[in-house]
Image (cartoon, rainbow, N blue to C red):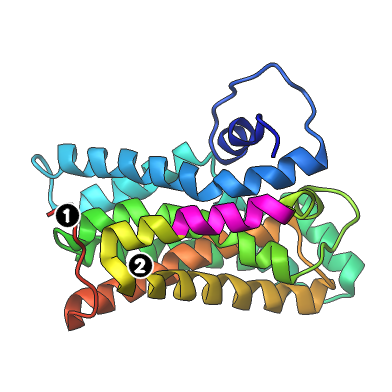
Amino acid sequence: MSPSAVLIAFEFLTPLRLRRVERTSDRAFGQALAWFPFVGLLLGLLLLGIDRTLSHMLPSAPVSALLLAALALLSGGLHLDGVADTADGMAVQGDRATRLSVMSAGNIGPAGVMALALVLLVQWSAIATLDTPMRGAALVIVPALGRWAATPVAVLFRPARPRGIGHALQQGMWPVAAPLGSVIMLLACLALFGPAGIALMVVAAGAAVLIAAAAARLLDGVTGDTFGAAIEVSQTVVLLFLVACAQRGWLTPSLFA
C-alpha cells in the first residue's frame, strides 16, 4: 500500500491539494480506493456539523438544500458531473465510440440536466424528511457508502477505455485496497447501526452495480463518469432506504441522538 494513497483519495474526492505532485501512477491511484469511505465519513461529519449549526436558524427544507450544496462543493461537483455525462452518453443514439465521445465532451445535454435534477430532488426530499437521530446518522454514513460503492463497481466491471479514471481505479486495488476499504465501511455501519447496518452496504452496492451494469452494456465497460454516477445513485438509493427504515423502524441508529 502506497503511503500517499490516503492523500490521493483526499485530493481526488475533494478540492484539497495537499502535495506538489503533478502526476500519480495508476497503481497508487487504485490503492487510494481503500480510503474512499474514510474520506466520505469525514465529509459526512462536516455535513453533520453544518446541519446542527443551521437547524437552530432555519427549517429542515432549506437546511437540506444547503447540505446538498455543501456536499457538492466539498466534492468539487465531481460525481454530479459523472451523473450528467453518463446520462447523456446512455441517451445518445449511436455506437460505443459515439457514446464515449459524448461523455468526454463535457457538454451537458437534456438527458444530463434531467438526471441531475431528479437525483438532487430525490436526495433533498429524503434528507428533509429525516428526523434526529436518523438524520444525523444518514448525513455521516451516506457519503461514505456512496464513495465505497466505487469498490464493487471496480471489482465487477472492466474499464471502457485503456486510460483514464475508470482504468486507474482498477489498478492496485488488490490485494489490499478493496478489502481494506470494505472493512472500514463495514466497521462504520456496525458502529452506527449495529449488525443490521450491513444491509446498507448491500443496498449501496446493489444500486451502484445496477447503474454500472446499464452503462457497461452500452459502453462495453465503465469510465470515470460511470463511477461518479454510481456514487451519486448509490447515495440517492441509500437515502431512500433510510427514509423507509425510519418509517418502518427497521434500523435504529445508536449514535447522533
SS for tag 2? helix
Outermost residue on the top side: it is: 20
Judging by the rendered image, the residue that carries numbered circle 1 is 60
Residue 61, by quadrant, is bottom left
Q: Amino acid at mark 2?
A: Leu
Q: Is residue 2 visible?
A: yes
Front position in the image: 76 or 247: 247
Question: Which secondary structure type mostly characterizes the magenta part of the structure?
Answer: helix
Asked whether residue 176 is drawn in magenta, I would say yes
Front position in the image: 252 or 211: 252
Asked whether residue 210 is drawn in magenta, I would say no
Residue 92, by quadrant, is bottom right
Q: Quadrant of the N terminus?
A: top right
Label number found at residue 239: 2
> Going 83% across and 62% down the picture, which residue do you hit?
100
Q: CA distance from mark 2 to mark 1?
A: 16 Å
Q: Quadrant of the C terminus?
A: bottom left
Q: Residues within 10 Å of mark 2 (few under 14, many from 20)?
A: many
The magenta stretch spans which residues?
A: 175-185
Q: Amino acid at mark 1?
A: Ser
